[in-house]
């Protein structure tokens, strides 16, 4: 059965507090300490952190949450992702460097990532990166690959179906929304496994159900999707 990927923007943006950790608790606690333990951006630990795991495990959520947290502290941040075809040079004003989906980097992006990494380290700035594979398996230039792996490395795991079901049920209860087992089965088997997307789907379903004065059922889900 083909899963549908949801293109749903988060209303408030990802936060560490909004990350449902499950088996990824060690990574979450590490990032909370890294982000919250300093009085200024330049004091965050310069020891690099690398997050890896399959799609839907929360890598981008955590990176974006750290970026938001740094901005709340008044720090500007260097952000590199595969869609950035022409990366800018390193900026000494950056409080940290964040790099997402490093396994997809082109030669140009790998060069920029290595330069950013070395410059950040020389200025005692933090580096947090994420990719699909562990450092040893990354098909990147060797000097970048080894640097990504010499600090803190965390393997993120996708929450199990039972864990996602429990979270959705709890979130629905908090909203005063009734979700039948049939609806939960439909949502969990047909949509992205990413928990953030599933929670956003629940929020949209709640709003659509209120708007149409209907209970949340499979026909309502289909109707909402058809009318988007």
Image (tube, grey):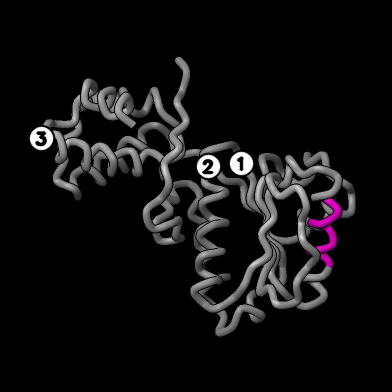
Tell me the quadrant of the picture where the C terminus can be found.
top left
The circle drawn on residue 213 is 3
In the picture of the structure, the residue carrying the numbered disc 2 is 57
The stretch in magenta equals 110-118
In the picture of the structure, the residue carrying the numbered disc 1 is 53
| 177 or 45: nearer the viewer | 177
**Residue 146 placed where, x, y %?**
84, 53
Mark 3 and mark 2 in contact? Answer it, CB < 8 Å.
Answer: no
Instruction: Tell which tag, 1 or 3, sits nearer the viewer.
Output: 3
The circle drawn on residue 14 is none
Q: Is residue 115 part of the magenta span, yes or no?
A: yes
In this rendering, is residue 10 above or below 104? below
Choose the circle earlier in sequence order: 1 or 3. 1
Choose the circle earlier in sequence order: 3 or 2. 2
Mark 1 and mark 2 in contact? Answer it, CB < 8 Å.
Answer: yes
Where is residue 180, by image quadrant? top left
């Amino acid at each position: 059965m083909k899963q549908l990927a949801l293109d749903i923007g988060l209303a408030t943006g990802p936060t560490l507090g909004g990350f449902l950790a499950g088996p990824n608790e060690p990574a979450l606690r590490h990032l909370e300490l890294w982000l919250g333990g300093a009085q200024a951006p330049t004091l965050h630990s310069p020891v690099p952190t690398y997050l890896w795991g399959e799609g839907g495990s929360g890598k981008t959520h955590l990176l974006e949450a750290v970026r938001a947290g740094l901005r709340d502290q008044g720090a500007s941040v260097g952000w590199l992702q595969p869609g950035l075809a022409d990366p800018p040079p390193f900026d000494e004003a950056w409080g940290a460097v964040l790099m997402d989906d490093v396994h997809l980097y082109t030669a140009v992006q790998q060069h920029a990532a290595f330069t950013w990494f070395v410059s950040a380290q020389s200025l005692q700035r933090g580096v947090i990166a994420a990719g699909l594979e562990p450092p040893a398996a990354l098909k990147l230039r060797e000097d970048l690959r080894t640097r990504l792996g010499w600090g803190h490395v965390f393997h993120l795991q996708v929450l199990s179906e039972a864990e996602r079901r429990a979270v959705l049920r709890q979130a629905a209860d908090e909203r005063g929304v009734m979700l039948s087992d049939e609806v939960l089965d439909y949502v969990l088997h047909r949509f992205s496994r990413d928990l953030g997307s599933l929670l956003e789907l629940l929020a949209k379903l709640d709003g659509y159900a209120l708007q149409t004065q209907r209970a949340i059922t499979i026909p309502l889900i289909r109707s909402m999707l058809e009318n988007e």
